[in-house]
Amino acid sequence: MKVDNIRDFTVDVPQAALDDLKERLARTRWPEKETVDDWDQGIPFAYARELAAYWHDEYDWRRVEARLGALPNYLATIDGLDIHFLHVRSANPAARPLILTHGWPGSVLEFLDVIEPLVADYHLVIPSLPGYGFSGKPAEAKWSVEHIGAAWDALMRALGYDRYFAQGGDWGSAVTCAIGMNHADHCAGIHVNMVVGAPPPDLMTDLTDSEKLYLARFGWYQSKDNGYSSQQATRPQTIGYALTDSPAGQMAWIVEKFHGWTDCGHQPGGQSIGGHPENALSRDAMLDTVSLYWLTASAASSARLYWHSFRNFAAGEIAVPTGCSLFPNEIMRLSRRWAEWRYTNIVYWNEPDRGGHFAAWEQPELFAGEVRAALAQMTL
C-alpha cells in the first residue's frame, strides 16, 4: 500500500465554524421529556439541556485545540486518502515503536493523557481512523478494518519502523487484531483492551460466576444498547443527515455511550440504572470529543466503518504475542479460556478493578501500566 506526502498538519478550526455551532445550539428544537426516571430511554432531557447549555455558554474548543497543537501532528496520504496522526518520538535510544488506535465514538483525544507515561519508552504513532477527526473521508467503499490494518502497517514502515507493536480498543481492537493476523512479519505483538471473539459452544457449559457476569453485561448491550450499531452498519448515510445538522443530536448520540460504556457507577451486568458519565469523564472531556465530531462533520463518515466492516468481519486466529486487559465495564469481556481459541499466544492477561470501554481516557495511569506490563513480555 502506497504512503506518500507525509507533511506537518496544524489544527486550526475557523472561528466561523465555532460561531455557527453556538447559533445552532441556541436554536435547538427539543423533544419532550422521557417517561422514565433514568437513562433507559436514552440521555435524559434535563441533562441534555444542561450539557448543551454548558457547550453554548462556557465550553472552550480552543483549549483542546492548543493541547493538540502542542504535539507533532501530521497528514500522510495512504492509498489515496489523507490520514491524520500524532507522532511523538521518545528521547530514549532504546524506545520501541507502538501504534495506538481508537474506536467509535472515540478519537485521538482519548490517548492524550497516556502520551507522557508511554513516550518515556515508546515512539508513539496515534492515527485518526479514516472518516474520523482530521483524517480524510473515504469516497470508496473499501476502508474496512482489514484495509485500515494494512494502511497502518504501511504507515509504520514509511515512518521507519519495520518492527512495531500495536494497541487498540473498540474498532481499534479490531484494527489491531487485523494487523496481528495479516502483518505478523512486521508486527511483533499486540495489546487489546477489548477482546473480540465468540466462544466456541463446547466452552459454554459449566460457566464460572465471572463468565455469567460477562454474558449478562453483553446481553444488556444486545437487548438495550446496540441500536446505534444496527443503524450505522445498515444506514449510516441516513443517520448522518440528522447528526451533521444538529449539534444537540450529535451530542446526545455520543454522550449516551459515555454513560453506557464507562465505569461510572453501573449495576452488575451493565444495566443502565444508576451512574452518571461525569463520574468517569469530565464534562469538558466529553464535549472535546463531541466537538471534534461536530466540527469535522464526521457523523456519517465515522458511522460508515460499521457498514464497511460488519458485513465481512474477519475474526481469524491471531498467533502473534498478545496482551489482554479486561476492564470491568467493557462491552464485551471474554474469559481467558474463551479468548484462547482465537488468541493462541497470550503472554499477558489481567483484569483491572476499575475502568470501562474508554480505558485510556478513564484510567490513563492504569491503562499505561497495562500496556507497559503486556509489552514487557514481548520482543522486537
Image: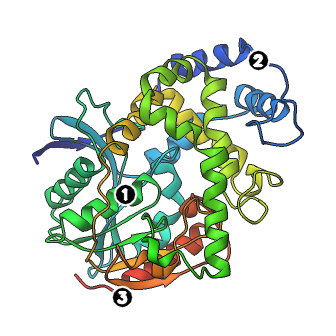
Residue at 57 percent of width and 67 percent of height: 364
Looking at this view, is 303 or 198 the one in front?
Answer: 198
Residue at 49 percent of width and 45 percent of height: 104
For the question of whether residue 83 can be seen, the reply is yes
Which mark, residue 30? 2
Secondary structure state at the residue bearing disc 2: loop
Please give the residue where the numbered disc 3 appears in the rendered image.
377
Q: Amino acid at mark 1?
A: Ala
Alpha carbons under labels 3 and 2: distance apart: 52 Å
**Chain-order first, disc 3 or disc 2:** 2
Image height of 235 relative to 284, above or below: above
**Chain-order first, disc 1 or disc 2:** 2
Alpha carbons under labels 1 and 2: distance apart: 36 Å
Closer mark to the observer between disc 1 and disc 2: 1
Looking at this view, is 65 or 347 the one in front?
Answer: 347
Specify how the rendered protein is coloured.
rainbow
**Chain-order first, disc 1 or disc 3:** 1
Q: Position of residue 374 (x, y in %)?
A: 42, 81
Tell me if mark 3 has few (under 14), some (14-19) or many (20+) residues whose alpha carbon lies within 10 angstroms of its own.
Answer: some
Image height of 50 relative to 245, above or below: below
Which mark, residue 174? 1
Image height of 188 relative to 83, above or below: below
For the image, the number of numbered tags is 3
Tell me if mark 1 has few (under 14), some (14-19) or many (20+) residues whose alpha carbon lies within 10 angstroms of its own.
Answer: many
